[in-house]
Amino acid sequence: MSFGRREFMYLMASLGATPIFANSHTRLSPTGSLKDYYKLKPFGNARILHMTDSHAQLVPVYFREPSVNIGLHGNKNVPPHIVGKDFLDYYHIKGNDRLTYAFTCVDFVKNAKAIGRMGGFAHIKTMVDSLRGEFGKDKTLLLDGGDTWQGSWTSLQTRGKDMVGAENLLGVDVMTGHWEFTYTEKEVLENIKNLKADFVAQNVFVKEDALMDGAPAYDEDSGLAFKPYVMKKLGKARVAVVGQAFPYTTIANPKRFIPDWTFGIKADELQTLLDTIKKKEKPDAIIMISHNGFDVDKKLAQVVSGIDFIMGGHTHDGVPEAVPVKNKGGTTYVCNAGSNGKFLNVLDLDIQDGKIKDFKFTLLPVFSDLVPADKEMQAYIDKVRKPYIKDLERVVATTDVTLFRRGNFNGSFDQIICDALRNVKGADISFSPGFRWGTSVMPGQKITFEDLATQTAMTYPETYMREMTGAQIHAVLEDVADNLFNVDPFYQQGGDMVRTGGLSYTIDPLQKMGKRISNIKTLNGKPLDPKKKYKVAGWSTVNSKAPGEPVWETVENYLKNVKHIKDLKVDTPEIVGIKNNKGITKC
């Protein structure tokens, strides 16, 4: 396969501010039709569409890309660990406000005010239908990488059913999962039954004792909980789609909801499966739909051979290229499609004589102002939201500050959560998990309960307040930092750094476990005393249910008292030891 790695981005950048997002060589008018804006030059005979990590955002959203996404060692200064202006320089984007807005935090507020929200399932459906129609429905496949059933108030209230209905209308063909597994096993299986797509995961197994007790499984002999792969015919081409669910689900999320299932990367089992697929099915192409995260996918592509493309998710990275990874069998290309419905991957394959001869990869931003909403999907969304509309539209505060979450360390909306926990609970220190999901709120905008729900709507939202020694607090910070910055991607078990309130500290990501965190101080500037006990508030306990109220109640009560956020000090740690790292910038 031959491919100009930055080809389509060069083309977009060369067209300046003209909104064209593809491998088309035609300059288009800003008043052009949808097909003009998103027209792809005809190529190949099989098309793979891919979206991931929508986090149940049915309507268009604001979403600020990170200013901190640090890559270390072999992942330093390579996608996706390049942010801000360095990202624009790397992909030769100049003078294009739309691409700047879609891919970076640069001039976020200015561009967001001019361009508006992105994504929305009604707009995505219009794009999907157009891309299918122009290429041929019988030659097109739509993949959903998971984190689809969680992240909104309506998805929580319907236990993901609203998103199953949206996926069915969208025409999803194959999906895998992660936050889907934060509902109960019964609810997950019921949703999969109602889903018209194939749900695939080669790395989820039913425990042996559960099988003995009659727990359902896709294959009782192997213990597989779900189909490991599915064969799809695209025109004359036969494509195998292998599923890879998030391997650390029962570590990062409560296993009490799905006690019968086990997860893992399962690289050896995957290699055996790939060898079997090649021998048994003789596919023209093998695609993996993955929820590993970008760095984990890259390592998996190094140690396993036989996959042509990994269509990945979990880390919410909008990467406008298919990144080649060498392995003993050849090359596997790793792709990602961002989050919150902002992007749609288009992979066009030229399949000849039983193999991929060439391909074109395009990451399309979903600009809601350019793409008309599909009427059928919009009607469905309106129907889903109607029973909850009073809650969704309830105003809890206003803000002069841009509120966002995404980034390795504290975001401004995370700070509000941490401040609320300390204030309402009467705590010295607060912790909030380093979740990547959660949309952004523009300055001058009303903060609605729906905005708050995009940060907090989950099945284990209960709060707590407990006493912890300074040594225990230090240990928590070290443990999460090792999860984020471990030299081996296979030990990076999901999420960003825990968010803190009432604390300051220094972090050296390049140090080893136990030596990354130093200079911890409390709000009054005093060093954290290892032996002293502090009151610590938090939420989202994984191992057992916390006793307190849901965190959205805590934060709403706090915001109603605050009423208006005029300024906000974000407790960001001092980061050392990462000189010349393009994964950190100021936006």
Image (cartoon, rainbow, N blue to C red):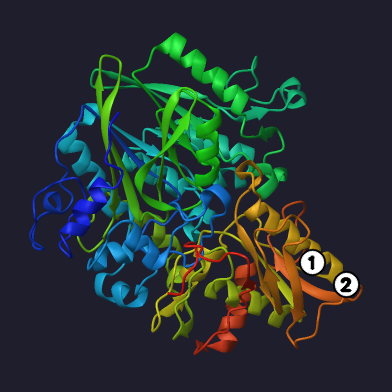
Q: Position of residue 351 (x, y in %)?
A: 26, 22
Res. 385 image quadrant: bottom left
Amino acid type at mark 1: His
Check whether the beta carbons of the residues at disc 1 and disc 2 lie within 8 A of each other. Answer: yes
Name the N-terminal-most of marks 1 and 2.
1
* Residue 434 horizontal side relative to residue 19, left or right: right
Horizontal and vertical percent for residue 42? 14, 36
Q: Is residue 196 above or below residue 149?
A: above
Q: Is residue 580 found left or right of 262 in the rendered image?
A: left
- The residue lying at 60 percent from left, 28 percent from top is 267
Where does label 2 land, which residue?
530
Which residue was labeled with disc 1?
474
x then y, percent, for residue 163: 43, 47
User: Between 331 and 60, which is closer to the camera in this rendering?
Assistant: 331
What residue lies at 27% left-to-right and 41% top-to-bottom? 4
- The answer to whether 353 appears left or right of 463 in the picture is left
Can you say which quadrant of the picture contains the C terminus?
bottom left
Q: At 51% from the left edge and 59% from the top edge, which residue is drawn?
A: 437
The quarter of the picture where the N terminus appears is: top left
Spatial distance from mark 1 to mark 2, Cα to Cα? 8 Å
Q: Quadrant of residue 300?
A: top right
Kindly state the secondary structure of the residue where label 2 is placed: loop
Spot the residue most to the top: 280
**Above/below status of 451 relative to 327:** below
In the foreground, 522 or 460? 522
Left or right: where 380 falls relative to 222: left
